[in-house]
Amino acid sequence: MRLFSQKGEEIATVKLGTILPGETEKRYVRVDTPGEAGTVAVVSTSGLSSLSKAASEFRARKAISFRTWDVTGVNLTSPGITLSFVKKDGIWSATSPASLKVNGGAVEDTLQTLADLEVVSFDAAKGVTPQSLGLDPPRTKIEIQLGPPASQVRALVLGSATGTSNVVYARAQGRPVFSVSASILDRIKGGATLYAERAPALNPSTATTPSATKK
């Protein structure tokens, strides 16, 4: 195993040796770091089980990675639907439609659903063009704006159904086409109504009725 810093500099090499005679749960390792003498040690083999996994097992299962509390804006676009929300001083408001009085809890629910959204299948469209999958141009697009100190945008494009029940093709920056649960589309198909502030329910105990008049 070779370990690198964020700058790409190699910081250590770990070499795995043989199992200890009579102790199958332990094996020798040697750790080398630049400019220092190598260190030989004995480690537990149980902590090395992940090294035998296929490379695909190390892929991030989240469709897009972000922290909900870092979000300062979200755009949801689909045929006939455009929803845009911004958060300022902890309060959500709408820029599209601008007249919408926003239920902030509904926006937060959508963000949490997106943060929890997992990949159903990796490399879901080998040899097939994004155009034929409804991904280019995007049929549905979600953009998440992250605030300071580093303003960034996370985008998720959703396309047509995969043929598997309740699963659609998806694409995110730097990743091959994958698939996710189509249930995420419910957070967009609901339109502005899903995010509208609801009037408080009338309390029967405080309700008044017209009084009868005496003749």
Image: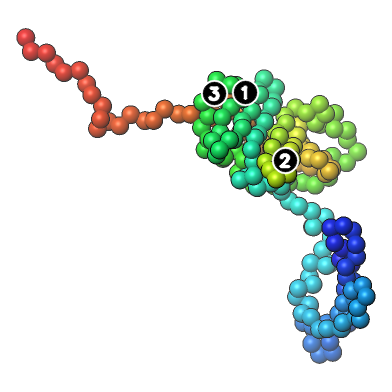
In the picture, measured across the screen, residue 177 lies left or right of residue 92, that is right
Measured as percent of width and height from the top left, residue 211 is found at 16, 18
Report the amino acid beneath label 1: Ser
Disc with the residue nearer the chain's start (2 vs 3): 3
Element under disc 1: strand
Q: Residue furthest left?
A: 215
Q: What residue does disc 1 label?
A: 96
Element under disc 2: loop
The residue sitting at 82% across, 63% down in the picture is 53
The residue sitting at 67% across, 30% down in the picture is 76
The residue sitting at 65% across, 35% down in the picture is 73
Element under disc 3: loop
Front one among 143 and 162: 143
In the picture, measured across the screen, residue 144 lies left or right of residue 207, that is right
The residue sitting at 39% across, 30% down in the picture is 200
Q: Residues within 10 Å of mark 1 (few under 14, many from 20)?
A: some
Question: Above or below — where is 23 with respect to 157?
Answer: below
User: In this orientation, does residue 175 appear?
Assistant: yes
Report the amino acid beneath label 2: Ser
In which quadrant is the C terminus drawn? top left
Q: CA distance from mark 1 to mark 3?
A: 8 Å
Disc with the residue nearer the chain's start (1 vs 2): 1
In which quadrant is the N terminus drawn? bottom right
Q: CA distance from mark 1 to mark 2?
A: 21 Å
The numbered dot on residue 100 is: 3
Q: What residue does disc 2 label?
A: 151
